[in-house]
Image (spheres, grey):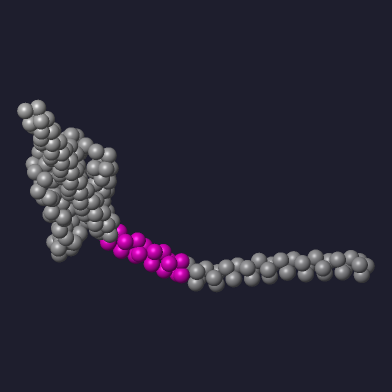
Amino acid sequence: MNGKDTDIRIFEHVKYLFAIWLITSIFVLLKFFMKFLIPVFICICFVISCGNSEAHQSQTPTNDTSIVFGTPAFTFPQLSAPAKEQALHWGVLEDFLSTAKKINGSNYQSIRNESELLKGYTDSLFKNIPDTLNTKPIYSRLLVLKTRTELLFQASHQSYIDSTRIQNSVEELNSAFTNLIIHLNEKFQKDFIDFQRKEDEENELKKQKRFKDSILNLELQDQQNKKV
């Protein structure tokens, strides 16, 4: 065996030992890291699980009567006398107003029940709009009110209730119904002003006609006197 063959054998032996050392080192490192990584991974999973559980619990429906939604002291604008008289012919509007007042300061179960009633009332409002109120501005405000009512109904009838979503839905419904009442009052106020203006114009025309008639009568009398 010459020196060259010996060197080759030694080199191959070294390569073999190095490969064994490298594999062993990697295995030891993996074992070392796994020893610490697995507990860390378990802790992370546990924290995430606890967080999800808390979120789940915070969204779980509750019948705790101490938790109320809306604004207990909230009041809707008063319907003007003409608007209130018209509301008598649009009976479901009074029902909606009465129920909408109840949702402010109500607990979850009450909100759930009242939202179902409100949803039915808005359907009736759309189907029974009086001719005097069947205008585009009123229709658009009714559409917004219907949308807000349906969103409140959905929020209060899900498996897991988001209290923030319910609160926002109640506030948006309050705003939508307030806008409808304000517009109804403005419409009847405008109708009254238009009627008053028309009446004044008619009275003025009658007054002018009487004045012209009186002048004409005077002229006729004057002509008759001259003939005499």
- Does 161 sit left or right of 213 as displayed? right
- Is residue 64 at least partly visible in the picture? no
Q: Residue at x 74, y 66 (%)?
A: 16
Q: Position of residue 97 (x, y in %)?
A: 13, 49
Q: Position of residue 201 (x, y in %)?
A: 17, 41
Residue sitting farthest toward the top: 227
Observer-nearest of 206 and 168: 206
Q: Position of residue 19 (x, y in %)?
A: 71, 66
The segment highlighted magenta reads 39-58
Magenta stretch contains residue 54: yes
Observer-nearest of 202 and 62: 202
Magenta stretch contains residue 121: no
Observer-nearest of 227 and 102: 227
Instruction: Give the quadrant of the N terminus.
Output: bottom right
Instruction: Give the quadrant of the C terminus.
Output: top left
Observer-nearest of 23 and 158: 158
Q: Residue at x 45, y 69 (%)?
A: 39
Q: Residue at x 11, y 41 (%)?
A: 86
Residue sitting farthest toward the right: 2
- Does 60 sit left or right of 43 as displayed? left
Identify the image quadrant of residue 54: bottom left
Q: Residue at x 13, y 36 (%)?
A: 215
User: Number of marks in the image?
Assistant: 0
- Is residue 20 at least partly visible in the picture? yes
Identify the image quadrant of residue 32: bottom right
